Image (cartoon, coloured by chain):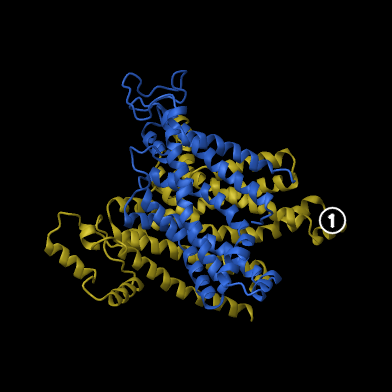
Chain colours: A blue, B yellow
């Protein structure tokens, strides 16, 4: 058994802590995240409020913890669509080849021409702000990157002897593609999936900050930071702490991605 | 094929891309649920106003005629009028695109300025503490969203220390650059992390190449080897990387401009979303895609010039 890569362990520990907060925010949080407390407005960090309070006296620590649920949900939901669609299309294009592959190549060239964020924002603009429309927008664009990775792997595997052997055995195309090629081609997209979750959190919080993602009063790290931006001269803690959580989550996912790349021997 | 032919072929390849960019921009606005015109005008528009705007946008024509009209107008530089500003969209974009391009260029320079020396120090000290420290800092930089870094920079360098203005664009070139410095740093941070990662890997690869051993056996000094042989070769892949990341840089500019109130196309885009100014969103999406595809073209040409093997 090989030693687990350090980044993987570090990333997994960060994610484990965040996951506990995300699954049971009300158990971990000291206060009600949406309860106003007019006796304690804009309090700096103290023993009672570790991360301070905002302009309504809400506890920043509790709000940061409550937001972790939404942000981890964004990481999962915003990557699931692209992963599934990208896997199906990448497998198909790589396995069938020919004209499909050519068309796919043109499509990839086109999609990478649009700045990802700009295209997602434009689609969200048309569909309307909100998390579910963001998931749709990301799925429309994001699958291309998974499909491109998988296609490259499948193209190589298709030529290998074991696939030929499967054909000789009389296996159907679906069985060869799903049971024999996909498991051998999956490593790069699993690694990319982890990195993509970090990107999804960055994207979700950026849209939340701009007012295009999660809508207030939903606690989301980007929304919390946007809440605090008008107070940053006198109450820096409202923006600082949700941001630290955001950076930690991004770091956790990308460390897991790096560690897995190392463990699974995936070149990037 | 000779080099000139390659360049010509690459120039021709951009044409279908431009047409497809137009198709995407055209389809984008058609994704609007319901009628685009009533969406744009809101609930209080009269039927006459709706009909007039529909005719003005050619929405009473069949879809393929609409598309041809759209292409003809786009080729003539006519993208319609902004609903919010009541001026031609083309003029609005022409006024603001230079601001965004200056911001992106400044950010690229800062990113390169940060990444190149640090990638060098990191690669030369591979797997020792300076390498670990630099990589750890950049890893955090890569995980930090632009709007957060921007707000932190504002809090420290604009609000507390008062070294820089809190936002805006100022008057005159010097003042513009002064106003754009903090936004450019915020935009540059994650970009420099990407450059530094790739450059470090290429420097490590070049360091073990045979021609470096040869240079050493010729008795060249370490400094000359590193600058003239290692850095030059490692930079070739970095040029491609910078070109490929122009899209994410422009996407980042949308956020940066919103944080620092910079009057570029990114801020225009966000404002247009809340104003339901779909003609602006459509034209901007298209304009930014064209900028990116021109950057890809320029990158390919520079690549061919730097590395003749790429022109094959």
Which residue was labeled with disc 1?
B216
- Which residue: 23% across, 70% down? B59
- Which residue: 47% across, 67% down? A110
Residue B264 is left or right of residue B7, and the answer is left
Question: Do we see residue B168 in this rendering?
Answer: no
Seen in the picture, residue A96 relative to A67 is either above or below; the reply is below
Numbered circles on residues, count: 1
SS at mark 1 in the image: helix
User: In which quadrant of the rendered image does the C terminus of chain B lie?
Assistant: bottom right
Q: Between A111 and B69, which is closer to the camera in this rendering?
A: A111
Question: Do we see residue B310 in this rendering?
Answer: yes
Q: Between A247 and A191, which is closer to the camera in this rendering?
A: A191
Residue B5 is left or right of residue B87, and the answer is right
Residue B178 is left or right of residue B215, and the answer is left
Residue B132 is left or right of residue A67, and the answer is right
Q: Chain of mark 1?
A: B
Q: Between A14 and B212, which is closer to the camera in this rendering?
A: A14
Residue B21, horizontal then vertical, whole percent: 41, 68
Residue B74, horizontal then vertical, whole percent: 34, 71
Seen in the picture, residue A105 relative to A225 is either above or below; the reply is below
Residue A261, horizontal then vertical, whole percent: 65, 51
Q: How busy is the neighbourhood of tag 1: few (under 14 within 10 Å), some, or many (20 plus)?
A: some
User: In which quadrant of the rendered image does the N terminus of chain B lie?
Assistant: bottom right
- Which residue: 15% across, 57% down? B45
Residue B108, horizontal then vertical, whole percent: 54, 52
Seen in the picture, residue B23 relative to A190 is either above or below; the reply is below
């Amino acid at each position: 058994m090989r030693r687990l890569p350090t980044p993987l362990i570090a990333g997994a520990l960060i994610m484990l802590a965040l996951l506990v907060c995300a699954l049971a925010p009300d158990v971990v949080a000291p206060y009600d995240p949406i309860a106003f407390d007019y006796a304690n407005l804009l309090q700096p960090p103290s023993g009672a409020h570790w991360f301070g309070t905002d302009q309504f006296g809400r506890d920043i620590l509790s709000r940061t913890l409550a937001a972790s649920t939404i942000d981890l949900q964004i990481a999962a939901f915003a990557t699931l669509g692209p992963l599934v669609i990208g896997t199906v299309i990448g497998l198909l294009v790589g396995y069938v080849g020919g004209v499909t592959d050519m068309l796919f190549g043109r499509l990839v060239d086109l999609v990478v021409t649009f700045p990802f964020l700009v295209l997602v924002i434009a689609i969200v603009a048309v569909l309307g702000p909100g998390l579910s429309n963001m998931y749709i927008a990301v799925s429309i664009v994001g699958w291309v990157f998974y499909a491109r990775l998988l296609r490259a792997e499948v193209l190589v595997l298709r030529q290998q002897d074991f696939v030929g052997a499967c054909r000789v055995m009389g296996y159907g195309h679906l069985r060869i593609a799903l049971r024999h090629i996909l498991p051998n081609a999956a490593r790069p997209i699993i690694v990319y999936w982890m990195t993509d979750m970090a990107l999804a959190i960055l994207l979700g919080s950026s849209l939340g900050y701009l007012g295009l993602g999660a809508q207030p009063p939903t606690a989301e790290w980007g929304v919390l930071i946007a809440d605090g931006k008008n107070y940053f001269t006198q109450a820096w803690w409202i923006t600082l702490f949700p941001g630290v959580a955001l950076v930690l989550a991004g770091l956790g996912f990308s460390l897991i991605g790096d560690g897995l790349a190392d463990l699974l021997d995936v070149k990037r | 094929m000779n080099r000139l032919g390659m360049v010509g072929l690459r120039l021709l390849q951009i044409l279908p891309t431009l047409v497809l960019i137009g198709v995407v921009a055209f389809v984008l606005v058609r994704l609007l649920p319901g009628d685009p015109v009533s969406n744009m005008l809101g609930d209080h528009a009269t039927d006459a106003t709706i009909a007039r705007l529909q005719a003005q946008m050619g929405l009473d024509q069949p879809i393929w005629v609409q598309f041809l009209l759209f292409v003809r107008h786009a080729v003539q530089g006519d993208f319609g009028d902004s609903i919010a500003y009541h001026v031609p969209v083309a003029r609005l974009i022409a006024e603001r695109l230079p601001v965004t391009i200056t911001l992106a260029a400044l950010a690229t320079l800062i990113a390169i300025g940060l990444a190149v020396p640090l990638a060098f120090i990191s690669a030369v000290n591979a797997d020792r503490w300076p390498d670990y420290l630099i990589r750890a800092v950049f890893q955090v930089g890569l995980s930090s969203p632009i709007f957060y870094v921007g707000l932190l920079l504002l809090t420290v360098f604009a609000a507390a220390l008062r070294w820089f203005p809190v936002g805006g664009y100022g008057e005159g070139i010097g003042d513009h650059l002064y106003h754009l410095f903090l936004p450019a740093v915020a935009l540059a941070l994650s970009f420099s992390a990407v450059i530094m990662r790739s450059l470090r890997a290429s420097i490590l690869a070049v360091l073990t190449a045979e021609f470096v051993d040869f240079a050493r056996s010729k008795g060249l000094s370490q400094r000359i080897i590193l600058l003239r042989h290692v850095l030059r070769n490692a930079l070739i892949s970095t040029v491609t990387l910078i070109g490929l990341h122009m899209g994410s840089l422009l996407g980042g500019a949308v956020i940066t401009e919103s944080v620092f109130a910079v009057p570029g196309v990114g801020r225009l885009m966000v404002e247009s979303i809340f104003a339901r100014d779909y003609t602006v969103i459509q034209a901007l999406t298209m304009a930014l895609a064209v900028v990116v595809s021109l950057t890809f073209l320029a990158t390919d040409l520079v690549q061919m010039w730097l590395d003749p093997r790429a022109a094959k």
